[in-house]
Image (cartoon, rainbow, N blue to C red):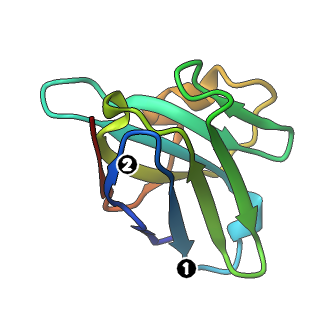
Amino acid sequence: VQLQASGGGLVQGGGSLRLSCAASGRTFSRYAMGWFRQTPGKEREFVGVISDFDTYYAESVKGRFTISRDNAKKTVYLQMNSLKPEDTGMYYCAAAGTQYSGSAYYRRGETYDYWGQGTQVTVSS
């Protein structure tokens, strides 16, 4: 599976962006799709994941971000509203071939089998 993230950019605080992650391969629907973000000098941070069981979010984005997927288009989306400067970072999508109940495993980067190249999001104050 190859993943291509897009949709990043510069936005003012309070604004919105929608990231997309397009996948190749015929088995996209079988994968749980996660989003992570990272800023220089900080560890990669779990943002959220959509699996067969549910959709889970980090506390820091809950209520502001929404993950959805279109299996026919082999694309997963991250709708980001009410953006804050602390949401700034490189956003990565990732695919996990094993489906888990609950979010614990999905919060770990090593759970994922494939990663996209990242798209930069910058939120100005």
Q: Secondary structure at mark 2?
A: strand
Q: Residues within 10 Å of mark 1 (few under 14, many from 20)?
A: few
Q: Is residue 31 above or below residue 87?
A: below
Residue 8: x and y, percent? 36, 61
Residues 58 and 30: in front is 58
Residue 93, image x, y percentages: 47, 53
Q: Residue at x 86, y 39 (%)?
A: 53
Residue 67 placement, left or right of 116: right
> Which one is closest to the eye, mark 2 or mark 1?
2
Using the image, determine if residue 51 lies above or below residue 109: below
Q: Quadrant of the C terminus?
A: top left
Residue wearing tag 1: 24
Disc 2 and disc 1 in contact, CB within 8 angstroms: no
Number of residue marks = 2
Secondary structure found at label 1:
loop
Left or right: 17, with 89 as reference point: right
Q: Residue at x 14, y 33 (%)?
A: 40
Residue 66 lies, in percent from the top left, at 67, 45
**First in sequence: mark 2 vs mark 1:** 1
**Residue positioned most to the left:** 41
Which residue type does callout 1 highlight? Ser
Question: Which disc, if any, is residue 91?
Answer: 2
Front one among 21 and 30? 21
For marks 2 and 1, give the CA distance: 19 Å
Q: Amino acid at mark 2?
A: Tyr
